[in-house]
């Protein structure tokens, strides 16, 4: 892969904080950018006059292979029925081949919608890692750990043994890093949680866990332990720096302060919480007041808004925060974009000639508002200096082949199933 930059001429670029640049720019493989003088040696020289360049989206809570059973899968189920009647029985038959196909479908959707990173939690993590690497995408791929039998492992001990090997092979220069995805306080015993935490500490890995997603989870944990989920995890010494806490919706302010103390990352998943009617979403002002690192995620496609479109997730995050707090000033487009792209070292390039991106405003200042609240087609996606998508065509995943294989897989999976 060449270290030479890419030049976009006569374009518009936004970096974090709404920093706007107009003119000729160089995009470097290390994620930086610079004004172009026009005489540099470049990998490509591109007419950017109809393009908008932004940081690529980062999706911080996914179950990527769920793309295989997404869209109308169990639509309209309450959470307990969705888990026990739809998801768990379906996942009991998951194989590495199904995970590979589902993950390839997810990779194709990520690239098409301008995402370059996913923090995943699903079975057969090495398969997902291979798919993301082949597609040129970044990932924090967590292998699930649970006291319930997994399709990939008979018990938590064997799941942790596999993860020990994957974590030992982590290389900071690799696109994909591996993590330990303890499912939740209700599917993991204290012993399992502590073994996972000890492994994360020993291998310098990250933990990923569903936390306080529903009132029932919170009430059950309190009834069993006398503590709420974050309090309980804190009391047993579970947290390691960088622990990814998905949802983190039904929490008290003292629990938010605990997450800050442990340098944890909370992931706002508004479409998932709303679709499954969990009754609450992460309260962004409270987390901001405490200084907690907050990211944005779609959750799995079978549970969330039926996909991995982070632009749509950023829009919904802005709307639900304003709605829940009766405050129309919360999460304007610039901040929603920052929330959805936190940590990104890569670039997405959008079509300014898309009707959804017009008008541009009297001062040519509506780019981000149009993108977040209306959407646009992703034309190019650059990850580490490599083009994963150019001129509206995905280069690293064969979309037509993906569509064929998932249709065949779903038909085969449900053959003879009533």
Image: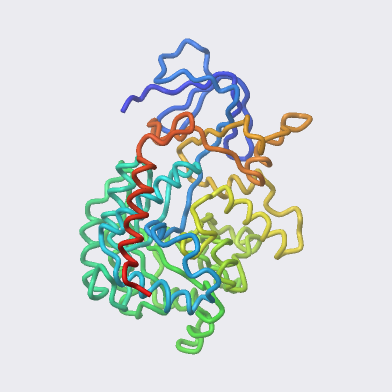
Pinpoint residue 314: horizontal percent, then vertical percent: 60, 51
Apparent side of residue 15 relative to residue 404 in the rendered image (left or right): right
Pinpoint residue 363: horizontal percent, then vertical percent: 76, 29
Colouring scheme applied when the structure was drawn: rainbow
Task: Tell me if residue 249 can be seen.
Answer: yes
Pinpoint residue 72: horizontal percent, then vertical percent: 50, 63
Query: Which quadrant of the rendered structure holds the C terminus?
Result: bottom left
Q: Is residue 308 above or below residue 276?
A: above
Q: Is residue 58 above or below residue 228?
A: above
> Front-most of 415 and 166?
415
- Which residue occupies 31% across, 41% down? 173
Farthest-out residue, right: 362
- Which residue occupies 60% across, 20% down? 23
> Front-most of 25 and 298?
298
> Front-most of 96 and 229?
96
Pinpoint residue 32: horizontal percent, then vertical percent: 47, 31
Q: How many marks?
A: 0
Task: Tell me if residue 261 can be seen.
Answer: no
Query: Which quadrant of the rendered structure holds the N terminus?
Result: top left
- Which residue occupies 58% across, 39% down? 16
Q: Is residue 17 above or below residue 98?
A: above
Apparent side of residue 289 relative to residue 258 in the rendered image (left or right): right
Rendered image quadrant of residue 149: bottom left
Farthest-out residue, bottom: 223
């Amino acid at each position: 892969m060449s270290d030479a930059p890419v030049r976009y001429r006569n374009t518009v670029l936004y970096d974090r904080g709404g920093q706007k640049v107009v003119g000729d720019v160089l995009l470097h493989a290390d994620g930086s950018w610079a004004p172009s003088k026009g005489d540099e040696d470049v990998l490509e020289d591109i007419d950017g006059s109809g393009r908008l360049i932004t940081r690529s989206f980062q999706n911080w809570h996914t179950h990527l292979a769920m793309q295989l059973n997404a869209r109308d899968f169990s639509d309209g189920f309450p959470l307990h029925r969705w888990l026990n009647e739809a998801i768990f029985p379906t996942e009991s038959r998951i194989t590495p081949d199904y995970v590979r196909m589902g993950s390839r479908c997810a990779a194709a959707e990520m690239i098409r919608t301008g995402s370059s990173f996913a923090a995943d939690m699903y079975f057969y993590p090495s398969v997902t890692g291979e798919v993301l690497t082949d597609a040129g995408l970044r990932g924090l791929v967590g292998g699930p750990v649970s006291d319930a039998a997994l399709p990939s492992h008979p018990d938590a001990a064997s799941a942790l043994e596999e993860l020990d090997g994957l974590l030992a092979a982590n290389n900071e220069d690799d696109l994909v890093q591996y993590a330990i995805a303890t499912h939740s306080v209700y599917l993991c015993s204290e012993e399992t949680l502590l073994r996972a935490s000890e492994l994360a500490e020993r291998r310098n890995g990250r933990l990923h866990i569903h936390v306080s997603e529903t009132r029932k989870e919170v009430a059950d944990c309190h009834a069993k332990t006398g503590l709420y989920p974050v309090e309980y995890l804190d009391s047993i010494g579970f947290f390691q720096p960088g622990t990814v806490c998905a949802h983190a919706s039904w929490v008290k302010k003292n629990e938010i302060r605990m997450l800050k103390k442990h340098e944890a990352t909370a992931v706002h998943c508004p479409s998932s919480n709303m679709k499954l009617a969990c009754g609450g979403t992460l309260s962004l002002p409270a987390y901001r007041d405490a200084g907690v690192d907050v990211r944005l995620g779609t959750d799995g496609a079978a549970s969330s808004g039926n996909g991995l479109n982070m632009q749509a997730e950023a829009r919904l995050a802005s709307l639900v925060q304003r709605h829940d707090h009766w405050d129309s000033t919360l999460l304007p487009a610039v901040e929603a974009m920052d929330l959805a792209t936190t940590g990104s070292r890569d670039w997405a390039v959008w079509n300014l000639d898309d009707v959804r991106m017009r008008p541009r405003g009297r001062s040519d200042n509506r780019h981000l508002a149009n993108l977040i609240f209306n959407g646009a087609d992703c034309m190019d996606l650059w990850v580490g200096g490599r083009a994963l998508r150019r001129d509206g065509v995905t280069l690293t995943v064969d979309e037509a082949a993906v569509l064929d294989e998932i249709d065949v897989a779903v038909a085969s999976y449900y053959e003879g199933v009533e």
